[in-house]
Amino acid sequence: MRNNRDINYTQKSIILILNFIILAALMVCFITPVQALTGNPIVTSTSPEDQKERVDINLPIYITFDRDMDDSTMTGSNIVVKDSKGQSVPARGIHYDPTSKTTVFIPQTSLKQDESYEITILTGIKDTTGLPLLANYVSSFKTTLSSDTPQPLVIDTIPKESISQVGTKRVVSAQFNHDMDPKSINTATFTMVDQNNNPVTAKSITYDESSRIAAFVPASKLITNTKYTVTIKGAPDGSGVKDSAGVNLNQNYVWAFTTGNTEFYDPHGIYMINSNACATCHQTHNALNTSLINKTTETALCFTCHDGTGSNINISSGMLSSSNNQSFHPIMDTGNPQAKQLFQCSDCHNPHGDADAFGNTYEKLLRVNDGTNTVYQGNEFCLACHGKTDRKFTDTYYNNSAGDHHDSIAAHYDTTNSILDSVTKITCTKCHTSHSGKYTQLTDQLEENLCLSCHNNQANSHSGQGNIQEQFFGSSTVTIISKHDITSSTEGKVECTSCHGSHTVGAASLSEGKAYSDLSDPQNTKNVFTTVAGTPNATIGNMTDFCLRCHGDNPPTAARSAIQVVPFSIIFPQTTFINSGWNKTNYQSSIHFSNGISCNQCHEPHGSSNPRLQSRPEDNSTTSTSGECLSCHSNDIGPSFNQTSHHPTLEIVGQHQDTETVSSKLSTNNRHAECVDCHDPHSVTSGALTVKQGNDLCLDCHTQSTKGSGFTKEAGGDNLHLTKPEHNINCSDCHVKTPHGSPNPKLLSTTSIDSNSKIVSINSGSTNSWTKESCGTVTECHN
């Protein structure tokens, strides 16, 4: 028996050992982590664990680190999962949870059964201080066996066995447990008959390798309230369906369902009647996510059918196809890195269907809540997010989406317009696709093509404005010579939306007696352009004010925010516009403007059969009262061109160009003078009715370069009138002061000079020059 002293010694020894263990534990807890965090980050664990077998094919992959990590480095290029053949597994989503320091890798589709996988976490992964992993981390696992036998089996169908009230546009599909031979799934092995044994013709039969789903799309709608039987043929002799290894489905797989009386009556099934339909999405005991859903993510669950294998509404292909689409509603876990991780499908759709007080289910299961109200249809559905309130989805969301789109009386929001309205009463979907689009802002057509997909006939244009497409591009009966270049073929840039904001046109009266404004402000298309004062969010002005928003000294520059949208920078084509160029700022000081003439009185807004968007043809002898200038000036100027001597303005037609030169203007076969050679309709004032004054105006054309034509009258050479300042002679001293026409030869102003025959035959002399005798004693100068 031990004495008390021995016991006390033993107790002290135990206490000492315990103290040592506690100290060691404290060192592990407090010292070791500090040492680890001072070095590079490490992977502490993965799930599935390294070398684990019989892993569920539907589970995500978890990677846990020893510290806070930089979530921007958690990408598909830094976390790679490959099968035994070296094929990469695409990610539907990769999320980092800073609370648990864990990254979740969600495969785009279920993993394959009976397959080995390797996870590689690369050194591109970094912590929040920028330190990377020192070396790649590699882990592997194997998925669960599919069955005790290698035979292919049908493991699921849509619709399920004995389901009733199936929509008459339902896609019928079957899912297999093995990779199948696509060639063995065809019209001979995948068949459907109605209750009278009449075969259903297939529009297509496809097999999706990633999901192992075969889909039968009927060529036409099924008959209402009819029982259909579907057969997947199995045969030991190889005439039926087989897997990729050539193993036969040994016997037929047969199931039946019954249609209802609508195309998509409650697409997800009438649950009180078809309670087994719930199993399509939910799993009671072995669910993989919240709400007992049987997929790892909500998006993956929706894509079970909406990938074209269980529904003819294929969302998956659009969301996953970044090569075909450029813009996406930011739906989570699609596997497409361009689709931001913001929304779930259920944010816009109620998968079980919402019904009104009368039990009517809303179209496409729509349901959205703006934080206060729940909306099921109409433009207010989209405005729950794109309305007056910034929902703060991201810091930049409201600016990127151009802020508030709410406009209760905008033309494109008119739900009574049959061209715009849909069964959902959401007119927005006429221009924007719901989930993904080929071009920016969820559109499926580019720029003017989107607008002209509707505005290609008179019925779709407001106020009888005619066929807008024809106004730009003409037709078999209409020839277009000039237009605002919405196709940018001249290196200019202007689009329909530069003048007509899609969400604002129609939001205000343009003028008294007109229903609404067709125009928005090019400097900010979120505002309408109107002549009616007092209109909210409007720019007030007349048509000249509108045109000068671009044809001023500060053309619009592209901008996009919650308060301003300029869709494109206005770029003018590289050509010389008549006289004042494209900048018409001075027009408001011109005599035309002061007499109440606005731009649209002379120009067409879209395209014209005449040059320079002129509303009327050029002036000529047949249009002397309806041409571009003489339509107004036929009384005051027109008679002058009927005089014996006149500038050849009406005789020479079809030669006028914006870029013509003096030499081309006065060449022997192209000699002409048009009104704009002397008058700039956009800038001349009442004090200066011509582009230049005095002799300078005449000498613009009558220069040395035209000497051989008999038109040379410039200063220099033998013209003593102009070379001797002391003579102080001007062109108008001998020629009519308003040189449109004269009854005298060579536009001479007095009959006295005309009476001298030598004047008339001035060019017949051997020297081809004037002589003092030519003006004789009948003039005041040479008498």
Image (cartoon, rainbow, N blue to C red):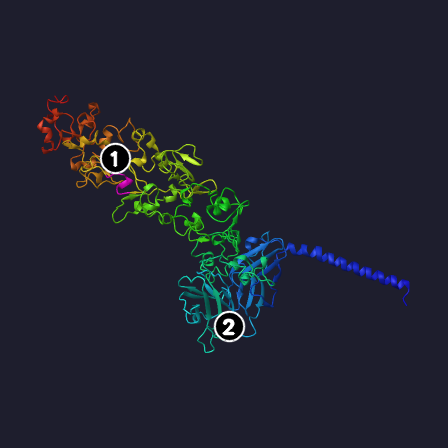
The residue carrying pointer 1 sits among few (fewer than 14), some (14 to 19) or many (20 or more) residues within 10 Å by Cα, namely: some
Q: Position of residue 542 (x, y in %)?
A: 36, 33
Q: Of the two numbered discs 2 and 1 on the same chain, state the one appearing first in sequence.
A: 2
Amino acid type, residue under disc 1 in the picture: Val
Identify whether 689 is placed above or below 71. Answer: above
Residue 13, position as x, y percentages in the image = 83, 62
| Above or below for 535 versus 176 | above
Farthest residue to the bottom: give it.
237
Q: Residue at x 50, y 55 (%)?
A: 337
Residue position for label 2? 152
For the residues marked 2 and 1, what is the alpha-carbon distance in whole angstroms?
84 Å
Q: Which residues are magenta?
A: 608-617
| Secondary-structure class at tag 1 | helix
Count of marks, rendered view: 2
Answer whether labels 2 and 1 touch (C-beta < 8 Å): no
Of residue 48 and residue 731, the one placed in the foreground of this image is 48
